Image (tube, rainbow, N blue to C red):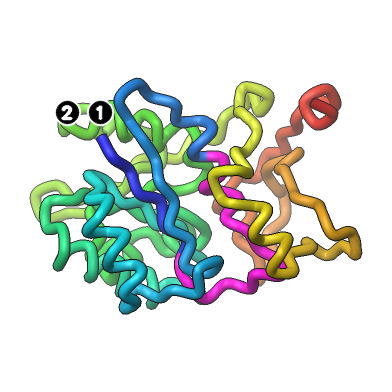
Amino acid sequence: MRVALVWPCGNDITYSIPLGLAYLVSNCKIPGVEFKIFDGTLYNAASSSKKFHDFVLNYRPDVVGVSCWSKTFLETCRIIAVIKELLPGAVTVLGGIHPTAYTIKALEGSGADYIITGEAEASFKEFLLNLNHPAKLSAIPGLAYRDKGKIIVNPHCPPEDLDAIALPDYDAIELEKYFKRGYRYFSNKSRNAPIWMTRGCPYCCKFCTAPQINGKKIRKHSVEYGIN
């Protein structure tokens, strides 16, 4: 199985990297499944670009996952449209902040086949393992899908043991190229990159989706995890 993970064009390269995709690659090690990332922001390549079209036609993925924020949702919809045109048989799945916050509207508006809400390190792996077993879809946490004309959204279950989550694969997202393009993540140091040491937030700020993405219970990695 070939899986393409797409980070849409339109993000600010100086402070944001596709960290979620880096976590997916490191936590979805499955025999016979390979991953390739197309970073529209890093390549400055929109869905209409020859570079993206060539990537799709040359790699010919079986599954295309797109992670997006609200500001890149329209570009995400265009990405899905391109995939449907060039590879009608490919399975499309969305993840990230916007699809989690507006799951039903995002599934309806994008034309994607599935959405995986919340933290997807475990659920995306389970999704790939059971993609050919439709009867098992209802058991995948956070999965949204269509069933007999209705959209079903499975409850999202954030993992309790964060240390079981592998560190992100920075090589997969070509972090070195981000450094050269000015990525600093709110620091004057030329080489730095984040990891998530805590997840969850008990507050309900109107401008933030953290409780929707990660739940309200605060969960923490161990100090040893962060040091290693």
Q: x, y (%) of residue 184?
A: 79, 63
The correct choice, above or below, for 112 with respect to 136 in the image is below
Quarter occupied by residue 12: bottom right
Q: Is residue 154 left or right of residue 111?
A: right
Q: Say which residue label 1 marks.
A: 130
Query: What x and y, as percent, mark residue 93?
Result: 31, 52
Q: Position of residue 37 (x, y in %)?
A: 44, 51
Residue drawn 23% across the image and 69% down it: 82
**Which residue occupies the extreme left position in the image?**
148
User: Split into 4 quadrants, where in the image is the C terminus?
Assistant: top right
> Which residue is painted at 65% across and 33% down in the image?
167
Three-letter code for the amino acid on which mark 1 is drawn: Asn
Answer yes or no: is residue 56 visible. Answer: yes
Residue identified by numbered label 2? 133
Instruction: Check the image and report above or below for 6 versus 220.
Output: below
Quick one: label 2, few (<14), some, or many (20+) residues within 10 Å?
Answer: few
Looking at the image, is 64 positioned above or below residue 75?
above
Q: Identify the secondary structure beneath mark 2.
A: loop
- Relative to residue 102, is residue 184 drawn left or right? right
- Please say whether residue 95 is one of the residues in the magenta stretch: no
The magenta-colored residue range is 8-23
Amino acid type of disc 2?
His
Of 151 and 194, which appears nearest the observer? 194
Report if the CB atoms under discs 1 and 2 are less than 8 Å apart: yes
